[in-house]
Image (cartoon, grey):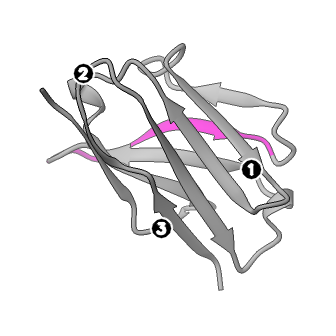
Amino acid sequence: QVQLVESGGGLVQPGGSLTLSCVASGFTFSMYDMRWVRQAPGKGLDWVSSISDDGTKKYYASSVKGRFTISRDNAKNTLYLQMNGLRSDDTAVYYCEKDNIRGQGTQVTVSS
């Protein structure tokens, strides 16, 4: 079955950086577009970024464009999200997603 395991979250100061990872299993990772979504405290899920199956096409929400970079390594079945210039409103649980299937998420907290 599809399994997605996110990691890399933590507590970071405003302006700091984190890199999230998502290891996928149970399907042919290289054949699927993937997404990062996030859920801030008390709010719904928000789309953050998407990447095509071969990694050539990348899309970003306006709120993160220029600060976050999505990438993937199909040989390692791994999706990444490099986050720079973090702000307090980036605080959320971050999930990788395939066809509305998500992992357990990783908490990112941006606070001084």
Q: Main secondary structure of the magenta part?
A: strand
Tell me the SS state at disc 1. loop
Please identify the quarter of the rendering in which residue 54 is found.
Answer: top right
Magenta region: which residues?
42-52
Residue type, numbered disc 1: Asp
User: Quick check: can you spot residue 45?
Assistant: no
Q: Which residue is mark 3?
A: 103
The reply to whether dot 2 and dot 1 touch (C-beta < 8 Å) is no
Crowdedness near tag 1: few (<14), some (14–19) or many (≥20) residues, C-alpha within 10 Å: some
Q: Which residue is mark 2?
A: 14
Pair 2/3: label in front: 2
Measure the C-alpha gap from mark 1 to mark 3: 16 Å
Image quarter in which the N terminus is found? bottom right
Decide if residue 29 is on the left or right side of residue 19.
Answer: right
Q: Is residue 107 above or below residue 27?
A: above
Q: Position of residue 43 (x, y in %)?
A: 21, 44
Q: Is residue 20 found inside the magenta-colored segment of the image?
A: no
